[in-house]
Image (cartoon, rainbow, N blue to C red):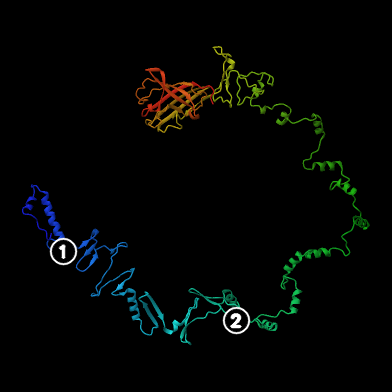
Amino acid sequence: MAGYIRTGVGVEDNIADGLTINAADFNAEYDAIEVAFGTSGHTHDGTAGNGPVITAVGPSLAYEFNANAMQPKSGQTSLDLGTTGLRFDNAFFTTTNTNNLTVNTSTTLTGTVNIGAVSLEEYIEDITGGNLTAGTGIAVAYDDAAGTGTVSLSHLGLQSLTDPNADRIAFWDDSGSTFNWLSLGTAISISNTTLNIADVTTSVSGLMSAADKTKLNGVETGATADQTAAEIRTLVEAATDSNVFTDADHTKLNGIEANATADQTAAQIRTKVEAALDSNVFTDADHTKLNGIETGATGDQTNAEIRAAVEAATDSNVFTDADHTKLNGIEANATADQTGAQIKTAYEGESNTNAFTDAEKTKLSNIDANAQTVTTANVTAAGAVMDSELASEASVKAINQQLTTTSSPSFTAVSTDTINEKTSANGVSIDGVTIKDGDVVLSSAKSLDFSANSDTTSETGTNVHTEKFSKFEQGTFTPYLYGDTEAGDIANAYQWQDGFYQRVGDFVHLHIMIRLGSKISSASSGNQIEIKGLPFQHYSTGQTMPLVMMPVIGANLGSGFTGMNIKGTIANQSGIPGILLWYNTTSAPTTWSRLRLSMLANGCLLNLQTTHLLGTIH
């Protein structure tokens, strides 16, 4: 450091490795450094003892210095001189160089800005006024004391225009050689920058409206509104293929019916005649018919007049009803002089007609009155049976006993599809029935009654409840495990769930096999095991059910349960019938404990059988 000299003789020798450094040694050295800073400082100007020249300062060394400029370092695009709260007081620029102060973008200057001894505003006014050539009619004046500027327009009389206090257009009035305000007519107005021209009326000029333009387009060129009737008549007559419709023409037209034509065909006229009210075409047939009617013929002669005319005619008589009846009684071609032989020949010559001889009359006399030909229908009507109607004529002839509704015949065997009781509610009594094939089917709510061959009391002397057998059923079901304190199936995967049942009367035998896929370790694993999914709902909750635990190979219920006994009780948890499982061991044979889910080992197989009396089963 420039100006710094080690103090004291031999002091520097005291500040060395391994020596004791006293406070006085340090104080002397720091005093020497302080004196050196206070006299010449540390300039960093590159001279000996003052350190290298500083070329960059600030955070990240953002400001760089060189011999010609202070500038942002490369890549730093935005740096400020001062802030809104901390500002530089003055900035001075030399006028010896041509490049002074350059502003590349818009800059806001607040306060008073002077260029030399002249304010920036006056400087600009002087420059502007000096650049305005003579004769432009524009003068710029600046009041330094008031700090205001005035632009005057003295050329061409613009300065003489007074404020019209309205929106107006200035124009050059050549006749007066001056500017003036344009006078607006009654149909023209100005609003800000918009020039408005009203639509034309009958009293005020203006723009033609769209409706008026459309109307004008519809009027022919040269059209007039004051043509006389004679002029119009002349124009009509002069037009090509055009004539005046005179009063005579009008009268003639009135005499012609509507839709009349001058070229109707005969067929069209005929159709019109037929279509007219109370009108018909007079055809050739009608004409021929008319020609056949005598002159003076009338269409209204009475029956008496016609009868009198017939009687009065020569060789003419009235054909009376009596004559007609008599004629009807005479056959066609009848003669009044036929012999017996002729009559016999004519009679036998008729189709399906034969002579009735004496021999045939004798034969007819020998046949009983109402005698009939022997037919199945006649035999049946007579209460008899034809041989052809019998499946076995010999069997019928072999019947040797009465077969009436009150008789009691005896047969060795009877083959039938249906046997109905004779008297309602008495039933059918059959002695010694043997079923060879097929099934005995009982109708709904019916049973087999064995009371006829049984005592009315049991061996203990109590009354027998029933001797009717009404239920037999067997099938399969799907059992599942259930926790006695939770609803729903245990959430565990089964390897299989098999159930078989056989019901005989009120005895039900169940065989249940459930193998678990893995040990149950859920929060419900402490619950007692209940088997659900039974095929019947038991009538009595809490009924003990002896269960037989079948041997299982390769599976167990958990350690410590070898040789245990299983029993079950009827449960109805959540309204679903099931069997609660209990166990005891050889060490405590009289103590029954709940068999819980947590006792089931991995792959455990429950193989249970039970037979019990259900009593009333629903």
Compare residues 586 and 281 and report the one nearer the observer. Answer: 586
Q: Residue at x 11, y 53 (%)?
A: 28
Element under disc 1: loop
Residue 231 location, quadrant: bottom right
Where 41 sits versus 503, above or below? below
On residue 389, the disc is none
Is the C terminus in the top left, top right, bottom left or bottom right quadrant?
top right
* Number of the front mark, 2 or 1: 1
Residue 588 location, quadrant: top left
| Residue position for label 2 | 221
User: In the rendered view, does 547 fall on the left or right side of 303?
Assistant: left
Q: Residue at x 21, y 69 (%)?
A: 68
Which one is earlier in the sequence, the residue at label 2 or at label 1? Answer: 1
Circle 1 crowding by C-alpha within 10 Å: few under 14, some 14–19, many from 20: few
- Report whether residue 51 is seen: no
Outermost residue on the left side: it is: 10
On residue 45, the disc is 1
Compare residues 146 and 259 and report the one nearer the observer. Answer: 146
- Report whether residue 29 is seen: yes
Circle 2 crowding by C-alpha within 10 Å: few under 14, some 14–19, many from 20: few
Compare residues 524 and 386 and report the one nearer the observer. Answer: 524
Question: Given contact means CB atoms under 8 Å apart, are the residues at marks 2 and 1 in contact?
Answer: no
Where 417 sits versus 227, above or below? above
**Tag 2: amino acid:** Thr
Element under disc 2: loop
Where 81 sits versus 491, above or below? below
Give percent across and percent down for residue 204: 58, 79
